[in-house]
Image: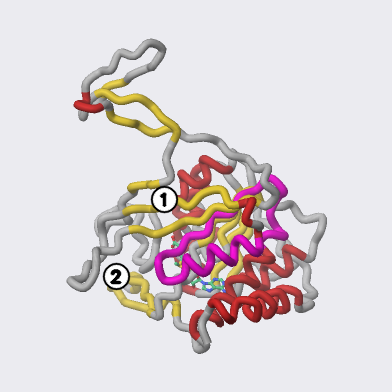
């Protein structure tokens, strides 16, 4: 049976999964106002959604498994030696349908924990984004579609059988149609790199040539985290801080609460710490949480953060 013909069943089963009762207190934040949860984000989302008084999230960025049918490793250093460890699995017994049910249930709950003026950024690639865009239309509403960002990069392999696949897609939806959005600017180089001298148009010059500043477009060229980059954690699917920073810059302000329910190596928490946002983050992999804590403790210069940061539900900060 095709995936499309299973859509009604997928939506129904996801709604049931999101609805199943789950009685627990939401976790409390640490002294920086942050929550880092080790476990399935379904549990965390149910706990957060169960508290009507809980502060709602301004921006959600998620980078879940892409339905790549692969396993991912992380390189960690132990006793001065580099070791390869299993980080997470992106394989699904019942194929695409199972993947979509699991993701959709969590998306339904994410909508509940968002502020009414919030945005969600959902990062995927060619494997599943076409199906998930239809699901986002269903969960968030077609009218609440905001952008489809193309993140273009140079790294990764290529094939003789097709064009080199060098972009991911980030779907952006609002909860209500009224949302916080801070327009960003980017350089647009003049033709011939020479000044136009149009009346009333401010022009600038750098090493490349003359340019004007225009509203940022939805195609972003940002390098992946390189082998020698200081950002590199060894976690296989780590995303660049510049990408997450741009997402947070256009959708949130200092002091806002933002969330990443599939935080991996902790890129979003690291950017939040540096740019003055508070975060809720989770990952079901112990290695992911360990890497996130390491990044945060290095930023805060606080070795104890490794002990303090992860919370049981309802425990004291
Ligand atoms: C693509 S990686 C995220 C990478 C991250 N953006 C970074 O910059 O490092 C996806 C992550 O989702 C986690 N994950 C998969 N299913 C999950 C679930 N149900 N709940 C929480 N985390 C999950 C995996 O352990 C993995 O770390």
Q: Which mark is residue 80?
A: 2
Q: Position of residue 225 (x, y in %)?
A: 32, 56
Residue depth check, mark 2 versus mark 1: number of the one nearer the observer: 1
Mark drawn on residue 73: none
Residue 236: say if magenta: no
The answer, for residue 161, to whether it is visible in the render is yes
| Residue nearest the observer in this picture, 14 or 113 | 14
Judge from the rendering whether residue 42 lies leftward or rightward of residue 168; answer left or right.
right
Q: Is residue 253 positioned above or below 80 on the image?
A: above
Ligand 1 within 8 Å, label 2 CB: no
Q: Residues within 10 Å of mark 1 (few under 14, many from 20)?
A: many
Depth check: 67 or 304 in front?
Answer: 67
Q: In the figure, is residue 63 to the left or right of 317?
A: left
Q: How is the image coloured?
A: secondary structure
Front residue (pair 77, 17): 17
Tag 2, which secondary structure? Answer: loop
Query: Which residue is painted at 80% across and 75% down in the image?
Result: 23
In the displayed structure image, the side of residue 233 where residue 61 appears, left or right? right
Asked if residue 32 can be seen in this view, the reply is no
What residue lies at 42% left-to-right and 40% top-to-bottom?
217
Tell me the quarter of the image containing the C terminus: bottom right
* Residue 117 forms part of the magenta stretch: yes
Q: Which residues are magenta?
A: 110-139
Q: Earlier in the sequence, mark 2 or mark 1?
A: 2
Residue sitting at x 36%, y 72%? 74
User: How far across and down, in percent of the image, does residue 188 sit?
Assistant: 33, 31
The residue where tag 1 is placed is: 241
């Amino acid at each position: 049976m095709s995936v499309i013909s299973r859509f009604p069943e997928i939506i129904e089963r996801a709604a049931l999964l999101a609805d199943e009762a789950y009685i627990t207190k939401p976790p409390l934040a640490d002294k920086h106002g942050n929550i880092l949860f080790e476990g399935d984000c379904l549990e965390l989302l149910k706990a957060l959604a169960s508290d009507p008084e809980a502060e709602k999230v301004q921006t959600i960025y998620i980078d879940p498994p892409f339905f790549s049918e692969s396993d991912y490793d992380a390189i960690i250093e132990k006793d001065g030696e580099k070791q390869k460890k299993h980080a997470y699995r992106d394989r699904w017994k019942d194929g695409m349908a199972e993947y979509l049910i699991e993701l959709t249930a969590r998306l339904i709950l994410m909508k509940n924990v968002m502020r009414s003026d919030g945005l969600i950024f959902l990062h995927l690639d060619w494997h599943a984004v076409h199906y998930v865009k239809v699901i986002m239309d269903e969960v968030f509403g077609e009218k609440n579609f905001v952008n489809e960002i193309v993140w273009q990069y140079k790294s990764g392999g290529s094939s003789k059988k097709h064009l080199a696949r060098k972009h991911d897609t980030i779907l952006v939806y609002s909860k209500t149609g009224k949302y916080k959005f801070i327009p960003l600017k980017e350089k647009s180089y003049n033709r011939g790199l020479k000044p136009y001298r149009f009346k009333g148009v401010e022009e600038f010059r750098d090493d490349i040539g003359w340019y004007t500043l225009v509203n940022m477009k939805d195609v972003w060229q940002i390098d992946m985290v390189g082998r020698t980059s200081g950002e590199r954690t060894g976690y296989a699917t780590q995303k660049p801080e510049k990408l997450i920073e741009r997402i947070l810059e256009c959708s949130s302000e200092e002091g806002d609460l933002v969330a990443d329910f599939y935080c991996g190596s902790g890129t979003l928490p690291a950017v939040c710490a540096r740019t003055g946002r508070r975060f809720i983050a989770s990952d079901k992999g112990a290695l992911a949480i360990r890497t996130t804590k390491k990044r945060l403790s290095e930023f805060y210069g606080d070795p104890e953060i490794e002990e303090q940061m992860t919370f049981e539900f309802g425990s004291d900060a």
